[in-house]
Amino acid sequence: MESPFLKSPLHGVGKPRPPLATISAMFARAVDDAPEAVAFRHRDVSLTYSKAGRAVAALARRLASLVQPGAVAALVLPNSIEFGIAYFAALEALTTPALLNPSYPASQLETLLREVSAGVIICVPSTRDRVADLPGAVGGSHVICLEENVTIATLVAETQGSATLRQPEPEEAAALLFSGGTTGLSKIVEHTHERLVISARCLERIWPTRAQEEVFLPIAPFSHIYGFMMGLLFPISACAEIVIPERFQPEHIVDLVARRRVTIFGGGPPAIYAGVLAAGNLAAADLTALRVCPAGGAPFPVELMERWRRATGLQIQEGYGMTEMAPISATTNVSGVRPGSVGMVVPGNEVQVVDLETGTRVLHPGESGEVRVRGPHMMTGYRNRPEETARAIRDGYIYTGDIGHFDEDGFLFITDRKKDVVFVKGFNVFPREVEEAVHTHPKVGAVGVVGVPDIRTSGERLIAFVVPAKGEALDAHEIVTHCASRLAAYQCPSEIRIVTNLPMTSAQKLDRVALRSAARCERKTLTD
């Protein structure tokens, strides 16, 4: 599909960005344009773009000496300076970076490493033990442990050799990411240089940046599409500084935002923003440099967005996307905010809502169905999974599995996942709608709603897990009364469980699989 984002130089708030064909060229431009600006800051270490360029070149030479062009370089790295250097070095060495979640246990890492046939594995001491015994089991992969086998400082100090490798081509793979499969196994989502460049340009159009003046603070893992784009590629495209937190601890995040004069907070899903709102030092923090608060990864309760606005004076700018779309196809910053909506479709993309039965009939505004998307930054497919690819991409559209609808003005509303819809007494119930209603109770901090089999009706019933707001006491009867005044009888949960926390995935999304498992257990689950 022809993309408007490749036809002309990109204009942000600062100077124009020249046309670029590859992610490698994007990084090289940042090194040339902002050599003395800080690229990465982590713990008490900072690295300028010029030093990052030298480190990338030195590590690329090592990788090229170990594996042939086209091999897969598996990154088992937490958010860090090492991650950024390893990713761009893998591209310069003409290998394909596979971004693995560093929190996975060894058994899960082994499965994924087998799936991608990794030629080299790049880790750090904190992840080394989980991969140390795996190379023999995954085809004799080489292992480079940054900070141990070689440090960033050593790479920066190396004498620069002459370039012998060609530049990557736009159609070559630039990232392998992982998305949950219908069989329970992760699928490998493949994105090319060209499509990731387009995605970075989309982000620049959505949130225009000032030339070399932005400071990003990402939260989501760089191995996740949201963290990868918002925490690495988008900032590099803007020649910006990337402040990498040591951990997600709300007071630590608030301190960094204030002290480092962060301008773009890559928060992500609702749990991140809710956590920061609970930080004890938020009220006194100087957030005057902060100007953009993007969000995504999970639907946002309207009440949470309003709480953020009251606390910071800033609007959360929600986007809609997925790993397969790298990642954003709709956003509120383009269209303006409408409560409950993820905004209008980003230019260059096409989003439709189709019927659940055939997936071919385009529905009218107000009618709910499955969301399908196509655009110039969609994946090329699932690697080595032609059947999965054929199911996901039909007639040129990615079928997202999300349930949603458009309103009369073209605002897109995402109500739920197709697989999460609960069948109660003959009605389809969307957990998101129930969660929104519960969340309006002033004592509620978080809520998750799932369905479980109901032997009395041969259908399902709803269970709501409710976390009280900080400092609040809450009982189930209050929630029952609250729901009865706001929901139809069939939408009201049949059981309320007051808990201290909700299970979350590594990307800080509500883990509905774990929640369903808990719902089938005794009431004591999650309450201690």
Image (tube, rainbow, N blue to C red):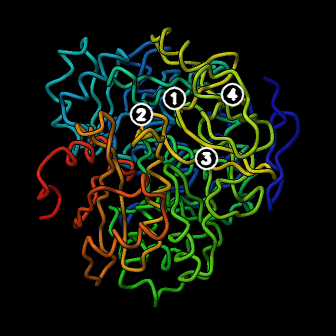
**In which quarter of the view is residue 7 placed?**
top right
Which residue is rendered at x = 80% and y = 61% of the image? 14
Mark found first going from the N terminus, 4 or 3: 4
> How many numbered marks are there?
4
Write the residue at 68% across / 52% down.
331
How would you rate the neighbour count of disc 3 (Cα within 10 Å): few for under 14, some for 14-19, many for 20 or more? Answer: many
Badge 3 is on which residue?
A: 320
**Left or right position of 433 against 16:** left
Q: Quadrant of the C terminus?
A: bottom left
Residue 130 at x, y percent in the picture: 18, 34
Vertical position of residue 26 compared to residue 448: above or below: above
- Quick one: label 1 or label 4, which is nearer the N terminus? 1
Judge whether 30 appears above or below 208 on screen.
above
Q: CA distance from mark 1 to mark 3?
A: 20 Å
Question: Which residue is pictured at 54% across the width and 37% down the height?
Answer: 402
Circle 2 — which element?
strand
Q: Which residue is mark 1?
A: 175
* Residue of label 2: 99
Alpha carbon separation for disc pair 1 and 4: 11 Å
